[in-house]
Every structure is written in C-alpha cells, then in structure tokens.
Image: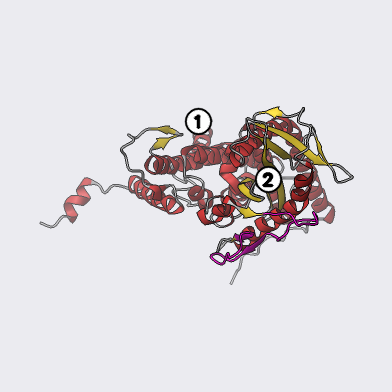
Amino acid sequence: MAATETTSTDEFVKGLWRDNPVFVQVLGMCPALAVSNTAINALTMGLATSFVLLMSGLSVSALKTFIPREARIVCFICIIASFVTAVDYIIQAISLELSRSLGAFIALIVVNCLILGRAEAFASKNKPGRAALDALGMGTGFTAALLAIGVIREVLGNGSLFGIAVLPASFQTWTVMVLPSGGFFAMALWLLIFNRLREPRPRADHRVQESPT
Amino acid sequence: MNVPQRPVEPPTSAWSMYRAIVGIGAMCALLIVAVYELTAAPIRLNQQRFLAAAVAEVLPAARSTQAVAIRDDGRLVPTTDAAELPVLLGYDEADQLLGAAIAAQGMGYQDNIRVLYAYSFAKRAIVGFKVLASKETPGLGDRIETEAHFIANFERLDATPADDGGGLRHAITTVKQGEKTEPWQLDGITGATITSVAIGDILNDSANRWVPVLERDAAGFARAQRSEGP
C-alpha cells in the first residue's frame, strides 16, 4: 500500500523536476518562447495547457479499451482538439483581451507534442487516476516553467510583474526581452540554472583524488 | 538461431474502428456544443465591450454612435439589431457627423480576419484601423497589428466614392513594401504578403459596399436612437 502511494506521488512530482516538460524534455517550445513575454500570458497558457493535458489524459485513459490501436492517433487528436476548442471558448468568456493576446497559440495547443506524447506514452497505458496525476504534474511543471520565463521577460522588458510596476521609473527597460529573441535568452538562463541544480555534485573524496598535488 | 517471434495480434474489425471513431467524434461534438452554449452569452457581452473600445480607438473624437444597416432596397436605416459586422456612425459633441466605424472580415492566411476601420466623411478616406480577430501566423501575419509602416497606411487611405455612386473611385490595393505611390494603395509587409493583401481585399470589398451608401444617406439621418458614448 505504502509502495503504491509513493509511486503515485512520484507520478505527480516527476513532471515538476525530473521530467520537467520544458527544462528537461524540451517539449512545447513554441508556446514556451512565444507567449511568455508577460507573466499573465505565460500563466494563462500554462493553465490552458494543463487543463487540456488533464482532461485529455483522463479521457484517453478512460476510453483506452474502446479505442483500437490502429485508430488511436486520430482519436487522441480528436479528443485533444475538442478540449482545446472548449478552453478557447472559456478564455474568450473570461477576457477577450487575454484571448487576443494569446492569439493563435491557444488553438496551437492541439499540436503541442507534450499533450499527444503524454496521451500516447502514459494515459493510454494507465488507469485514469495515475493518468490524472501524471497530467497534473506535467501541467504544473509546464506552467511553472512558462511562468519562470515570463517573469524574467516582463520584469526586465517592461519593469513590471503581472502589469504592476516593480522597478523604479529610472530603470531602463530591456526591450529585447519582450521581443522573440528575449524568449531564447530567458530560456537559456533557466536551462543553465536548472541543469546546474540537477547536476550530481562530485563527492568530497573524489575531489581530493582529482586535485593536482 | 532462435529468434523470438512477436505474438501476432488479431486484426481489428472494421466495426470496432467505426465505433471508436464515430463514437468519440460524437462525444467531442457534444462537448463543443455544450461549452459553446454555456459561454455564448458572456462572449457576446465581452465582444460588445471590446467593440465599444475599438470604436473609441478608431474614431477617438466620437462622443455618440448610431448603428446602421443597409435595407433590401439599398437605403441606409438605423438599427438596434446586433450585427455580425456592425457599422456605427460617429458624432462629435456638437452632433456633427464625423465618420463611420465599419467592421469587415475576410480570409487571411490561416483563418478569417475581422477588422474595424474608420471612414472620415471630411477626408473621404480611411483614417483608423484595428484588428478585431486574427489567427495569423505569430511573428509573420500578425505584424499587421504592430508594423509601424503598415499602420501608417491608415493615417489617410483614400476611399473616395466614384462619381456614379457605384463603388470607390480607385480600388484599394496592396503593393509590395516600399512601392506605394498612390494614396489608395496599401504599403504591404514583406514576409506577410498574403495577410497584407488580404487586408487590402477586405477593406476594398467593404468600402465598395458601404462608402457610397454612407455618403448618400448618412448626413440626413434620424438621430433619435443614437446611444451615448462610442
């Protein structure tokens, strides 16, 4: 019983760190770079993707015995596209400005390889509960990564965070950070930090042996 | 050599395939219709607010507006019906007719593009432009909203009606970037050719339909139904 609980927790946690979709698997780069110019855009895109990931994962897992192997991709895409359409309507109902600022990228969630990848590799082979945990973990990891990129870009590029000024008016904003190239700079910075933190540290005795004397 | 044989899976029957694809298609259709019905009202409200803000942007001097429509006999009439592509006459503080904010749409590179443009009666030109909805390629087609030289087209884009009232004197056309020589030409965007040509076509089609009618009928209009605020 205890082993099962640990495994379930792992299903959720792996998406946050070990298999983070953006910083480790490097999936979904198109929205990660394109709509992370502000924190609110990054958060909305992350939440929208997480919603689609969760709902499509649950659906694929629940219907896995009903879907023949030969027709699985067309069925997965149909399910994913339906939830993307639903999330598009929901965002338009919440805020038309937000929907416009995300532009075509909401519709492009359909072709985010992260979602089809999780449906094919995990949800179609596991029970709904585990599929939901996996989707929640991946979605949270994706949202956190987009938000991390968006925060840096908005703070340096606009001097604000979620539209609220956080830097003094005298700060010369780095316009390049809100331009497309700024996405690459912020992404590279986070990859550097993320990989440095994930890198196993050499043990002290190894360092002693390797140091020239 | 003992090569392990993969177990042969029995072929999937056609019925199973049909059942899965049609069944999932039906479920997905039901989901989309349900969400559409639930969100239709708030989306419409948001669109009205957004349109009001867009009219204020393209006709900043307007203090009141009047929605109009073209009747079957070709005459301009006031309307209170919500149109898919609304046309609003704009009046200043002294009740003088300033111009019209006209919504139009047409096919872009990816999908339909919806725009709102302002026609000035004094200048006989398009003097404002805003994209209401677009799914053009990010970084390419969506530059119609950000490219400074393209937006500069709408400081004064000639839309003079023809003398016979049958359309525009000169068709609005899109030319290659930097090759604009006439006031009715749109300076296009290199790298977004299809989208910028689509904008020219949308404006030309819409202005050909609306400008002659507005010029003929808008001045002598009953203003009782005008709403305050753009």
Q: Quadrant of residue B48?
A: top right
Q: Residues within 10 Å of mark 2 (few under 14, many from 20)?
A: some
Decide whether residue B171 is among the magenta residues.
Answer: yes
* Residue B15 position within the rendered picture, expressed as x and y whole percent measured from the top left: 84, 52
Q: Quadrant of residue B140?
A: bottom right
Decide whether residue A98 is among the magenta residues.
Answer: no
Q: Which residues are magenta?
A: B159-186
Most common secondary structure along the magenta stretch: loop
Residue assigned mark 2: B121
* Residue B208 position within the rendered picture, expressed as x and y whole percent measured from the top left: 75, 54
Q: Quadrant of the C terminus of chain A?
A: bottom left
A189 relative position to A72: left or right: left
Q: How many marks?
A: 2
Against A93, residue B153 (above or below) is below
B196 relative position to B102: left or right: left
Q: Residue at x 82, y 55 (%)?
A: B13
Mark toward the viewer: 2 or 1: 2
Q: Quadrant of the N terminus of chain A?
A: top right
Q: Chain of mark 1?
A: A
Task: Tell me the amino acid under the disc marked 2.
Answer: Phe
Q: Chain of mark 2?
A: B
Residue assigned mark 1: A2
